[in-house]
Image (cartoon, rainbow, N blue to C red):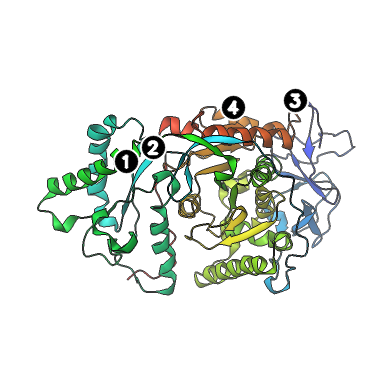
Amino acid sequence: MNAKPLSEEKPLYIRVNPKDNIAIIANPGGLPPGTRFPCGLELIQYVPQGHKAALTDIGQDEAIIRYGEVIGYAAHPIARGGRVDESSVQMPTPPRLEELPLACNVPDPLPPLEGYTFEGYLNDDGSVGTKNILGITTSVQCVAGVLQYAVQRIKAELLPGYPNVEDVIALTHTYGCGVAIDAPDAVIPIRTVQNLARNPNFGGELMVVGLGCEKLLPDRLVPDGDAGQIVSLQDNRGFIPMVEAIMKMAEARLVKLNERRRITCPASSLVVGLQCGGSDAFSGITANPAVGFAADLLVRAGATVMFSEVTEVRDAIHLLTPRAASEEVGRALIREMQWYDDYLRRGWADRSANTTPGNKKGGLSNIVEKSLGSVVKSGTSPIMGVVPPGERATQKGLLFAATPASDFVCGTLQLASGINMQVFTTGRGTPYSLAAAPVIKVSTRTSLAEQWHDLIDLNAGTIATGEATIEEVGWELFRLILDVAGGRKKTWADQWGIHNDLALFNPAPIT
């Protein structure tokens, strides 16, 4: 990769691995036919930014290689300098799960990283919050409207009196009734709702609003079924008494949360979720590698880091099972891949359904190419454990949290698993964010960071232009994580107050 700053006059392509027979065009606006590179390559057709050009003649059915891995096979002969687009690439079969190597190339631990801290909120259970929020859980969608009305009043009438509490949010969802509550897969949405209420940014102040006749009874969401933590709407005579009952219980919790203060906490208290959305061909060479470098720094500092998105791991799983800290962890990775293969098959779909029109417009031909760029977010540390969807993480180090790739569902499940903040990479751009935890947005391209200057928190596009290295951007992100976690800086999304709704993963039947 050229290390000099990019200009539109100087053509630049990026080849990731010496084995690659394709490269992506880095110039904004792409390059026209006739463009010659210093190596002698000449484009024979227009190639947009982020899209692929053939570095050699590629015969029909020959392997197309990026990241040193086969991303597909040529659907027709491709001439040197020609564009390699989606129609040119035939999907390969995914790695066979029964043949994967397990824990055979476990990385040696990197040197500990000591002395890094942030100002956080210490909870009674030892977890640490990066925000101080009252989160009000719902047991069923029926109560969402009433609770949202009550939250508006709480923010207007009560919250100003408790200046140390940052926000009040309703943890609403579409589950709770009209569902097969005892179906085996129902455990996923149920434990997700249970664990959402336990997120460290809520300070342990549990409160549940239920209806009274739902299948997911509120007492399943509180320890020992403590009725003192539940407001049941059917126990009230009229709308206003419902709202006042919610406000009364909320104020008792605001009193306690207002007593919390930030204290100096070690970086090992961080639980950071990693996610990508609106990915493009630059994701795997700028933002995601920088995030992977920062992930290694966090692990070295003793923190917990979760990467996710099963369908964006499946085609690169052969690169991950050797890094599993033990054969047991490797088998857990395979278990989650197999479960999701079966889940998709039941819906007459497969992992190819993942890739979006925006991904393809950004230069990604298929889910294989997308996966190879996605998994580099995990860095190089050993994979210490696997967290099934909706479960709470209990280990330190690098973990795989098995979630769908959907931004909203993945974010919801990572919150349930206990993240106190999230790092989100994007190439095409998305205003996605979470109310319950800070979300740092990292752009893959400088042009996106310039276009969305008041939504993107960190620009990794400087890696592609040679203005910065992966290591430099990784360190910048690590320091930004500490600043945001400690309240010294705010993400753009939090400044604007733009946040997505929660979205549970419910593979169980609806009745």
Q: Is residue 23 rendered to the left or right of residue 495?
A: right
Q: Residues within 10 Å of mark 2 (few under 14, many from 20)?
A: some
The answer to which of 72 and 331 lies nearer the viewer is: 331
The label nearer to you, 3 versus 4, is: 4
Residue type, numbered disc 3: Ser
| Residue behind mark 2 | 260
Which of the pair 57/413 is nearer the observer?
413
Residue at which label 3 appears:
7
Asked if disc 1 and disc 3 are in contact, CB closer than 8 Å, the reply is no
Q: Earlier in the sequence, mark 3 or mark 4?
A: 3
The residue lying at 70 percent from left, 56 percent from top is 382
Give the amino acid at mark 2. Answer: Arg
Mark 3–mark 4 distance (CA, rounded to whole Å): 16 Å
Residue 259's place in the image compared with 305, above or below, is: above
* CA distance separating discs 1 and 3: 56 Å
Disc 1 residue type (three-letter): Lys
Tell me residue 405's x, y (percent): 54, 55
Residue beneath disc 4: 450
Which tag is nearer the camera, tag 4 or tag 1?
1
Residue 400 in sight in this render: yes
Q: Earlier in the sequence, mark 2 or mark 4?
A: 2
Spatial CA span between label 1 and label 2: 7 Å
Quarter that holds the C terminus: bottom left
